[in-house]
Image: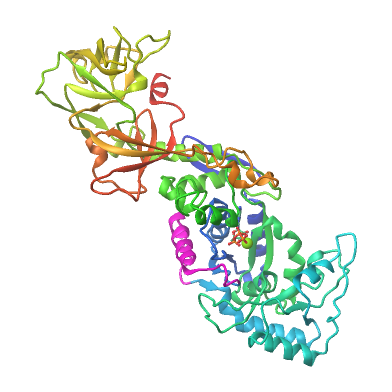
């Protein structure tokens, strides 16, 4: 698999990944009448995360690439954990990523009648039986990969008794856990999944779509391949943990398929990211226990969290392209995702100025009642993006960290007697510092050089540092939420002996109020549309913005300040 990225044209050309190669070969051979149909099969028991995005890009991507179709199938076989809230969020997230399933929205629950019929047929053919043992007893008889399992005492029940019991299971006559339906395959098989796998269990919880119609629900292994078959799916692409399930997938598909059409399972490696967790169970726990503010908390690895944080669909898709698809498990660095986010935001985000930790600067030789309007570039990466206006006046704010009373060598920001350029404006020189009784700096006094504004002769005069700033009387107050990694351990999933909650980063969220933003940034606030706060990072208006409070989420900090970029 080679890959060449041409940075100049931003075009990526690459050879096929191994899944695409398999699909291409199948199409060439004319399998399944030359049809290509994939599916993305989420269980609606939580919100989608970035790992699902990898599967979505594969399932929809390969269909797009070869002119096929991709179904959205909700794998809703466990009513206890599933909910329509999740169904809705899954739809929204897939669309946001830029994929569409048209009218091909399906539910495993749509196939309950066919699956039930198939189960009855397998019972009649002596290929399935009702087991009265508890799940613990069944597990204890399973054996190990090197030791065969033990056959259930109920394994050789008559067909009549099995039919009767299974139907009564579904009629609600027995309690949950009292009986299961198992496939009668081989308790000594090398593949543990062949040791009489459970096909159906009793669940009395109402289903979000089928209500109380069913009291028995199929297990994943008895539902997935058949659902693929009923839908006409040709390539059932999933993650590597399903490799050992594949023979069982094929076993049940064999009961339905003929030589004209059969779905095939192909596996690729999961996406695992550093400093976070991908388990829906753990993510749900974080939400339920209030350890985060919800599924769409911007620290979550969920698609909705990333959207709220300001990540773009393009950045997520580029990241997934970058890591690629293999047959080996790996842990992907979150820095790579962050790189993709910066890369895209640098391209698309409008620039503005905001001062996170303000200190006031008084320009003593600037007239008290004078105001000027400066034209600021919206985005130097996009020549057509235009400019916006930014007011300048006698009092401005700069970042407290951009001033030092006793600076070390090579401090190119503001210091007594020193000069800096105000980004897009004049050069100023520090003449004095005003302190309170405790010695804290409350004001910095400067003079400005009136010749140095853009368009004037002195505009070319060079100074070492350039600072961002906002006019004090025009500034608008905002709150920013500074997000950091959710966990302070690189791979929380690799520490089974520790409670994952102990590994949460206690500093993953800092809220800063009293941030001063230029008026332009306070207008047209659109949640999900990120800005670059010059020299600071990318920030996105949050859903919680109101008329009286502006809230920005820090999407990501800048790796390089524009100062460095400018000097290169
Ligand atoms: P669980 O089955 O434990 O509830 P899951 O993460 O497997 O969780 P599903 O809803 O079954 O959730 O996943 C839907 C699809 O997304 C499956 O095809 C699965 O293989 C794929 N998927 C899930 N997690 C990842 C991941 N981390 N990387 C790539 N694909 C994933
Ligand atoms: Mg799953």
Seen in the image, is 134 located left or right of residue 346? right
Residue 525 colored magenta? no
Q: Quadrant of residue 405?
A: top left
- The image shows residue 59, relative to residue 524, as above or below, that is below
Residue under the image location 49 percent in, 42 percent down = 11
Q: Quadrant of ligand 1?
A: bottom right
Q: Is residue 29 visible?
A: no
Q: Is residue 558 above or below residue 459?
A: below
Q: Position of residue 214 (x, y in %)?
A: 59, 82
- Residue 268 coordinates in the image, percent (x, y): 67, 54
**Position of residue 27 measured from the top left corner of the image (x, y, whole percent):** 64, 64
97 vs 9, nearest the viewer: 97
Magenta stretch: includes residue 86: yes
Give the residue at x 59% y 48%: 277
Give the left or right position of residue 371, taking residue 323 as reference. Answer: left
Question: Which residues are drawn in magenta?
Answer: 78-103
> Would residue 514 appear left or right of 87 to someone viewing this image?
left
Identify the image quadrant of the C terminus.
top left
Where residue 180 sits in the image (x, y, percent)? Answer: 73, 78
* Residue appearing at x 61%, y 38% in the figure: 489
Foreground: 99 or 276? 276
Side (left or right) of 114 relative to 535: right
């Amino acid at each position: 698999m080679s890959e060449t990225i041409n940075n100049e044209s931003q075009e990526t050309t690459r050879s096929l990944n191994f899944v695409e190669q398999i699909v291409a070969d199948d199409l060439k051979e004319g399998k399944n009448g030359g049809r290509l149909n994939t599916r993305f099969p989420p269980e609606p028991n939580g919100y989608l995360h970035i790992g699902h995005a990898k599967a979505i890009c594969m399932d929809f991507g390969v269909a797009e690439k070869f002119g096929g179709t991709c179904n959205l199938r909700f794998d809703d076989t466990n009513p206890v954990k599933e909910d329509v809230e999740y169904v809705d969020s899954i739809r929204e997230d897939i669309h946001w990523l830029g994929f569409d399933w048209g009218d091909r929205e399906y539910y495993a629950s749509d196939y309950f009648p066919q699956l039930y019929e198939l189960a009855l047929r397998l019972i009649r053919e002596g290929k399935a039986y009702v087991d009265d043992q508890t799940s613990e007893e069944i597990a204890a008889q399973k054996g190990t990969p090197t030791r065969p399992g033990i056959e259930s005492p109920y394994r050789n029940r008559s067909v009549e008794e099995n039919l009767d019991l299974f139907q009564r299971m579904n009629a609600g006559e027995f309690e949950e856990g009292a009986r299961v339906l198992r496939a009668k395959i081989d308790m000594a098989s090398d593949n543990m999944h062949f040791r009489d796998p459970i096909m159906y269990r009793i669940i009395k919880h109402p289903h979000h779509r089928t209500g109380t119609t069913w009291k028995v629900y199929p297990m994943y292994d008895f539902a997935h391949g058949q659902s693929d078959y009923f839908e006409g799916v040709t390539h059932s692409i999933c993650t590597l943990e399903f490799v050992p399930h594949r023979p069982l997938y094929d076993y049940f598909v064999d009961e339905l398929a003929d030589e004209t059409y059969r779905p095939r399972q192909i596996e690729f490696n999961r996406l695992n990211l550093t400093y976070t967790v991908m388990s829906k169970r753990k993510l749900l726990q974080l939400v339920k226990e209030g350890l985060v503010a919800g599924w769409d908390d911007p620290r979550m690895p969920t698609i909705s969290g990333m959207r709220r944080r300001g990540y773009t669909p393009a950045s997520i898709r580029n990241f997934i392209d970058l890591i690629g698809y293999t047959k080996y498990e790996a842990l992907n660095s979150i820095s790579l995702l962050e790189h993709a986010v910066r890369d895209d935001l640098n391209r698309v985000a409008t620039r503005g100025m905001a001062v996170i930790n303000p200190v006031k600067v008084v320009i003593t030789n600037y007239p008290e009642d004078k105001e000027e309007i400066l034209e600021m570039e919206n985005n130097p990466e996009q020549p057509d993006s235009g400019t916006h206006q930014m007011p300048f006046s006698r009092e401005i704010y700069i970042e407290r960290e951009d001033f030092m009373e006793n600076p070390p060598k090579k401090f190119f920001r503001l210091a007594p007697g020193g000069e800096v350029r105000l980004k897009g404006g004049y050069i100023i020189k520090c003449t004095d510092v005003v302190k309170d009784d405790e010695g804290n700096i409350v004001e910095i006094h400067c003079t400005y050089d009136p010749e140095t504004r853009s368009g004037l002769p002195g505009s070319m005069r060079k100074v070492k540092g350039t600072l961002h700033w906002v006019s004090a009387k025009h500034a608008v107050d905002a709150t920013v939420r500074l997000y950091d990694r959710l966990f302070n351990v690189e791979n929380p999933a690799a520490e089974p002996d520790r409670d994952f909650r102990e590994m949460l980063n206690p500093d993953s969220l800092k809220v800063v109020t009293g941030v001063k933003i230029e008026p332009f940034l306070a207008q047209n606030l659109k949640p999900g549309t990120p800005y670059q706060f010059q020299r600071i990072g990318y920030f996105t208006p949050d859903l919680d913005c109101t008329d009286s409070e502006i809230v920005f989420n820090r999407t990501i900090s800048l790796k390089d300040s524009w100062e460095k970029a400018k000097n290169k």
